[in-house]
Image: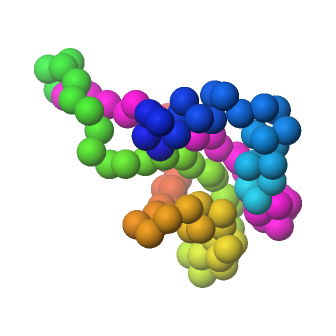
Amino acid sequence: MNEKAVEEAAKATPEEREATMEPWFSWAKRCGDKLVDFGTPLMGGVRLNKDGSTNPSEKGVFGYSILKTESLEDAKSLMEGHPHMAWSDGCDIEIHESMAVPSA
């Protein structure tokens, strides 16, 4: 999300913000209990280097959600019709599988 879009969102009325979020809420309802964490919009990412310095992130990550599914195919089917895909050309969604961490 660019700076102008953030400024416009800040000026929106509560009703306008709710209307803007309605497609996401509908998607979340369709996912049901497979949606573990709705997530949040992200911005201003930085890459932390070994020496402690930072650089602006080049990843272009604008948000996340966490789904719990039985397969990659199930996760992909839940992403069909996701509102992010309707924003503009160049919008995409990445799906990553989490790995179990061994207990200590």
Task: Check the image and report above or below for 46 versus 53.
Answer: below
Return the x and y of residue 33 as percentages of the image width and height: 83, 58
Q: What residue is drawn where x is 54% and y is 30%?
A: 7
Front-most of residues 54 and 33: 54
91 relative position to 81: left or right? left
Front-most of residues 81 and 98: 81
- Residue furthest out toward the left: 51
84 relative position to 43: left or right? right
State the image quarter where residue 41 is shown: top right
Front-most of residues 55 and 9: 9
Q: How many marks?
A: 0
Return the x and y of residue 104 as percentages of the image width and height: 50, 34
Return the x and y of residue 14 as percentages of the image width and height: 82, 32
Q: What residue is drawn where x is 82% and y is 61%?
A: 26
Mark yes or no: residue 1 visible: yes
Which residues are the magenta region?
A: 25-49
52 relative position to 22: left or right? left
Return the x and y of residue 50 as percentages of the image width and height: 17, 26
- Residue furthest out toward the top: 52
Q: What residue is drawn where x is 67% and y is 74%?
A: 81
